[in-house]
Image (spheres, grey):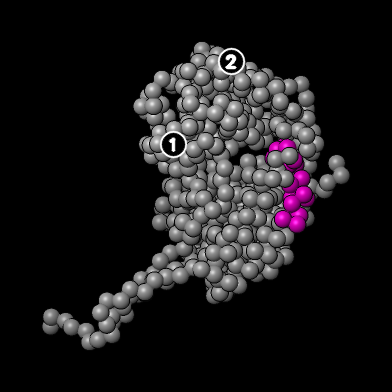
């Protein structure tokens, strides 16, 4: 391997790489081959303490800078990230196994977008003035303080930036813990931020397993926790944060519906279903894994989908013609294979896929089930792999009721040429991020997040500022004070 994936050290604290070999071993496995491409160590409690202390120490001076000054650093970091997109994309591919064809356009680029967007917003943060006769009220938008970001393994560069950019724009500092499965990319984000002029201690990265995350969440110096992860992990983190009344943003999992009416463009609907199930080998929280197709076009949909899936090309993810990568880990592949076995056992019709290609690494074929019933395991539980379930439906009312019949509410999509129906249908969907005649587009300008069990709060868009800052109200009296005695 020509690319050097071993970082200078495991952690980035107070503006410098830090190592403590007493921490638990944290090997980095390249999913395409199963080879170890780097060896890191989890943070010891002493290092976790050191990172939080650095963030605490750096926060007042960072908050005292003007928004324009903070924003300039974030925007400079965005420029550096774009200049190094190729290098960062290759590292992301080694970290996750995702094809370079994908990482070149969807990972570091979206991280740079977040740094640029919130860098631009930083100078606009303001309160309001409310006149009450001679008296008046003003509000101040203030940072929360030391914040913690906990990342998932599917978009390690993007998630680090989606959390850091609004946090830092608002004057907070951050300790970020990447997923132990994909620990490499956040270190590069920290490097780039420092190079762009970020003061030491403002953004720190510590590696580790669940106990490191628990140590961060439970520390009383931390005022905010933002997690991207599964619902079970989210429940634990939310409960731990609640003990100290910490602010939280939870971007959790989903079992999202994609509803296709028989007047839809079939080709566009098939394209969206492919993107909503097989992009990133199905490892996307917002994926539309329950595909409801109106009875009039269901057979044609499955036939066209099967034909299009012949275009899947597996192989070396560094080959830009490869468009489908491996699962992120052997364990995740085993989980997905367990769901596929359950789907077959419970009577769903396996249309295509379901097997393991004969190659090194953690590969699995893109899989489509038809004749799926709403009570089957594959219809109810988040799989987080390349498994599509196709359902039939007759009427709009039926489709809406069944689409909403889930504890999740992250995302949803609808395909129809009837614009009135499209807007009526999304108004009825119980999901935080919806699409009409497309799927899974998440520009930084758009708020992203879930309803029901899929999360709390929103990432991206102007509204994210509300989740990374707090409002202080100041009443100013201009006259004498009266009292009853």
Residue 463 located left or right of residue 475: right
- Residue 279 in the image: state x and y as whole percent: 64, 34
Q: What residue is pinned by disc 1?
A: 419
Looking at marks 1 and 2 on the same chain, the residue that comes earlier in the sequence is marked by 2
Which residue is depicted at the point 51% across and 19% down?
Answer: 297
- Marks 1 and 2, how far apart in space? 34 Å
- Give residue 49's quadrant in the image: bottom right
Indicate the quadrant containing the C terminus: top left, top right, bottom left or bottom right: bottom left
- Between tags 1 and 2, which lies in front? 1
Question: Magenta segment, which residues?
Answer: 82-100
Secondary structure type for disc 2: strand
Residue 350, numbered circle = 2
Camera-side residue of 13 and 192: 192
Residue 355 located left or right of residue 247: right
- Residue 233 in the image: state x and y as whole percent: 51, 41
Camera-side residue of 269 and 475: 269
Which residue is depicted at the point 64% across and 53% down?
Answer: 111
Q: Are marks 1 and 2 in contact (CB under 8 Å)?
A: no
């Amino acid at each position: 391997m020509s690319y050097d994936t071993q970082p200078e050290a495991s952690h980035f604290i107070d503006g410098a790489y830090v190592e403590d070999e007493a921490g638990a071993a944290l090997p980095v496995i390249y999913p395409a081959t199963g080879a170890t491409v780097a060896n890191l160590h989890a943070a010891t409690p002493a290092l976790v303490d050191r990172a939080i202390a650095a963030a605490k120490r750096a926060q007042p001076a960072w908050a005292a800078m003007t928004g324009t000054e903070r924003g300039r650093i974030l925007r400079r970091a965005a420029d550096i990230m774009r200049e190094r997109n190729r290098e960062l994309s290759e590292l992301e591919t080694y970290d996750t196994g995702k094809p370079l064809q994908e990482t070149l356009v969807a990972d570091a680029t979206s991280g740079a977008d977040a740094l640029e967007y919130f860098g631009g917003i930083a100078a606009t943060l303001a309160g309001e003035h409310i006149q009450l006769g001679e008296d008046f009220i003003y509000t101040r938008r203030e940072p929360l303080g030391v914040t913690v970001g906990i990342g998932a393994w599917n978009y390690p560069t993007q998630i680090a930036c989606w959390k850091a950019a609004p946090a830092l724009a608002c004057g907070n500092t951050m300790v970020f813990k990447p997923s132990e499965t994909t620990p490499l990319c956040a270190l590069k984000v920290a490097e780039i931020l420092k190079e762009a002029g970020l003061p030491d201690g403002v953004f720190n990265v510590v590696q580790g397993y669940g106990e490191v995350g628990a140590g961060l969440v439970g520390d009383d110096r931390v005022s905010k926790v933002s997690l991207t992860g599964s619902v079970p992990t989210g429940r634990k983190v939310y409960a731990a944060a609640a003990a100290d009344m910490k602010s939280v943003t939870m971007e959790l999992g989903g079992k999202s519906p994609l509803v296709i009416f028989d007047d839809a463009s079939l080709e566009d609907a098939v394209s969206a279903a492919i993107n909503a199930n097989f992009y990133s080998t199905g490892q996307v929280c917002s994926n539309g894994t329950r595909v409801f197709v109106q009875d009039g076009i269901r057979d044609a949909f499955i036939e066209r989908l099967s034909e299009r899936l012949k275009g899947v090309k597996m192989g070396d993810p560094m080959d830009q013609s490869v468009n489908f990568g491996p699962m992120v880990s052997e364990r995740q592949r085993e989980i997905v294979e367990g769901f596929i076995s359950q789907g077959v056992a419970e009577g769903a019709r396996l249309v295509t896929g379901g097997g393991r290609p004969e190659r090194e690494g953690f590969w699995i074929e893109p899989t489509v089930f038809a004749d799926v019933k709403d009570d089957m395991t594959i219809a109810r539980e988040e799989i987080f792999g390349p498994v599509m379930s196709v359902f039939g439906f007759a009427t709009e009312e039926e489709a809406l009721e069944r689409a909403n019949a889930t504890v999740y509410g992250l995302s949803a999509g609808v395909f129809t040429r009837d614009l009135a129906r499209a807007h009526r249908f999304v108004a009825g969907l119980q999901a935080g991020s919806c699409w009409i005649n497309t799927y899974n587009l998440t520009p930084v300008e758009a708020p992203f997040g879930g309803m029901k069990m899929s999360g709390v709060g929103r990432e991206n868009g102007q509204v994210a500022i509300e989740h990374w800052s707090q409002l202080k109200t100041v009443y100013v009296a201009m006259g004498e004070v009266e009292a009853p005695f």
